[in-house]
Image (tube, grey):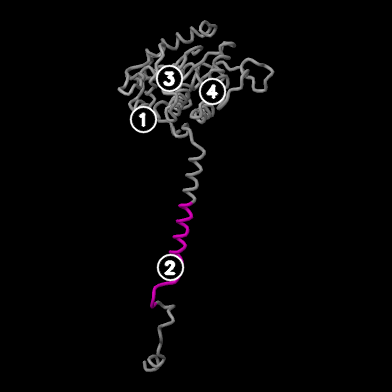
Amino acid sequence: RYQRRVHGDLYHSIESDQHFTMGKKPVLEPTEDDIRKLLACKVHLGTKNLTKPMERYVHARRPDGIHVFDLDATWQKLMLAARIIVAIENPADVCVISARPYGHRAVLKFAQFTGAQYIAGRFTPGAFTNQIQDKFMQPRLLVVTDPRLDHQAVTESAFVNIPVIGLVDTDSPLNYIDLAIPCNNRGRQAIGMLYWMLTREVLRMRGVVARSVPWDIKVDLFFHRDAEEMSKKEEEVQHLQQTDYLSEKVTFEKTLDGPSGSWGDDTNTWDAGQWAAE
């Protein structure tokens, strides 16, 4: 394909440059905290189905039939994807797409922090090929969350020679995918964690974020939030606030009444004769 010939030197230079070091430890190697985050979000868990091209990325198979990814391959592909994105001079020439609802918020935040374009939801056919469309765009790089759901964008990218980076599962098709990142592309937390790590690495390579300092953006911002759950939580918070207000109001009223036998109690009597005798 065209992009393989044009970008072949770029891919080769990136792969040959993986072993730069900072001190004694390689810069792009994952830390123990990174591996824990990937495991906690179940990025390593695939599906029960396995296609032939994805066999090299699978480490084992659980007794229940779920295939387990090799996290080392996932991390290396993630770092390579970050280097390819950084190689694009204009950040707006990168387009991130997610038709899966769990990836809508993730691609939005990725575009917000990196300056890329994003399409969350349905992809309009002809956005890459029909120039008379209002939403026509010509990106230099395409990042898709699921090649199966984003098949229309992947197919059109092949027509106009746009390289594609895809988050692929064990049963995902690899047609027209130039760089496959093996991972769980169905989980809410897995998708958010992958885009968070990809965003962090892109900003580190651009020099925006120091590698020695933890990124202050929480991964929760990249997780999908259900509108119904958020409305229920808001209602619960309002109910608790009203309950606290009523309890404080009752306590304040009791305090104003004062204890029995105080100076404001009308039952106390004062004998004027005692004052005269003294």
Marks 1, 2: nearer the viewer: 1
- Which residue is labeled 3 in the image? 169
Q: Is residue 52 magenta?
A: no
The circle drawn on residue 97 is 4
Q: Earlier in the sequence, mark 4 or mark 3?
A: 4
The circle drawn on residue 25 is none
User: Would you place residue 227 above or below residue 245 in this image?
Assistant: above
The quarter holding residue 135 reads top right
Amino acid residing under circle 4:
Ile
**In 3D space, how far apart are the residues under numbered discs 1 and 2 (Cα atoms)?**
51 Å
Q: Residue at x 43, y 19 (%)?
A: 169
**In 3D space, how far apart are the residues under numbered discs 1 and 4 (Cα atoms)?**
25 Å
**In 3D space, how far apart are the residues under numbered discs 4 and 3 (Cα atoms)?**
16 Å
User: Would you place residue 184 above or below residue 266 in this image?
Assistant: above
User: Would you place residue 50 above or below residue 219 in this image?
Assistant: above
Q: Residue at x 45, y 52 (%)?
A: 240
Q: Residues within 10 Å of mark 4 (few under 14, many from 20)?
A: many
Q: Residues within 10 Å of mark 1 (few under 14, many from 20)?
A: few
Q: Earlier in the sequence, mark 2 or mark 4?
A: 4
Instruction: Please state the extent of the stretch shown in magenta in the rendering.
Output: 239-261
> CB under 8 Å between callouts 1 and 3?
no
- Which residue is labeled 2 in the image? 255
Q: Residue at x 69, y 18 (%)?
A: 132
> CB under 8 Å between callouts 1 and 2?
no
Q: Earlier in the sequence, mark 1 or mark 4?
A: 1
